[in-house]
Amino acid sequence: MRIAVDTMGGDLGPGVVVRGALRALASLPKETHLVFVGDEAQVAPHVPAAAVSRCSVQHAPDVVTMDDAPAAAVRRKPNASMVVAARLVQERAADAMVSPGNTGGVLAAAAFTLGRIPHVLRPAIATLFPTAANDCILLDVGANVDCRPAHLLQFAVMGAVFARLRLGLEQPRVGLLNIGEEPSKGNEAAAAAYPLLRASGLHFVGNVEGRDVLKGNTDVVVCDGFVGNIVLKFAESMLGFTRGLLRDEITKSRRLQLGALLMRPAFAALKQRLDYQEFGGAPLLGVNGVVVIAHGKSSERAIENAVRGCGALVQQELIGRIAAELGSIGGLLDKNEQRTDLGNR
């Protein structure tokens, strides 16, 4: 198994990415090989001699920055690290790729280079989301701002496949994020997606309101990328906001400070459960290759988990499973809908 790692896209530099990826090797099969993609002069010094037998460096001098327009930059910079990593997967020189770079850039590089799995209309970014019960899968969280009913149906199918692999669930519960529980609620896409999901054969539990996501009654929450990205970013900001409020209250009295000391183990456990570094990265579901997008500010721990999770998806044959599941629901999709999207590849 060969995993291409984009070392240049992260905010903390190639050294953090290389060291984090090397940490993941301890829990991956012994035959796993890492291909570090980036400027060789900046990457090679971070690769210890002891690790040379299990990794190599693929020179890629350019970078798609956060300020670049993703699609234009991918076309203009064929030697950018994320583009070269995607090309390695397309050429079967690597089985998967991990990148902490510009999300739009990774999406463009993967879509242009790898194409889509047969039957897939639109790829979607899926992320693990903590709830009161267990983690759930939220998708799409940014790949598609506007969606049609057929897209939401396919997101649900791909999300269910990912939930089976990542969460170990035999029959994940799928919910459609909406403004009410009634089938007719929501915008046109959501209202039209409801009967498709009900007829899909998935364990569809109906519409899920925003207040219900954190209760853990749903294993896969489906929405368009506009809504999903807002939900994700709002949740991330609430963690820091709540931590700041709690810190302010604790400093108001000695008694509260003493109580906080006694509660420190509980606070530490809670922080670990909610820490994005433990989730590693978000897979881009639907492209014809395993692609994991890591957070731009990923630490060594986050990169380690992203590479480990990426390797697991290769071993679990994610691409073949998605293709098989989507093929089985092809009859639910309007033929005109399929022709429209497939013609825009």
Image (cartoon, rainbow, N blue to C red):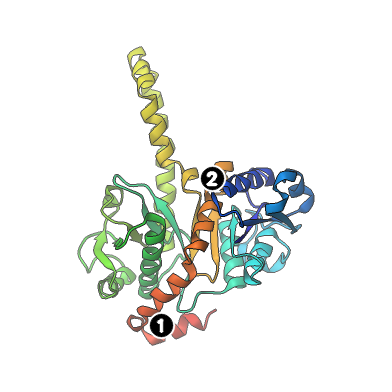
Q: Is residue 272 left or right of residue 4?
A: left
Which residue sits at x=45%, y=41%? 275
Figure quadrant of residue 188: bottom left
Percent position of residue 102, x then y: 60, 56
Q: Is residue 155 left or right of residue 89?
A: left
Q: Is residue 307 left or right of residue 163?
A: right
Q: Quadrant of the C terminus?
A: bottom right
Up-down: is 51 above or below 289?
above
- Which residue is under mark 1? 337
Q: Secondary structure at mark 2?
A: helix
Percent position of residue 199, x then y: 26, 75
- Which residue is under mark 2? 302
Quick one: label 2 or label 1, which is nearer the N terminus? 2
- Residue 27 is marked as none
Up-down: is 6 above or below 190?
above
- Tell me the kind of residue under disc 2: Ala
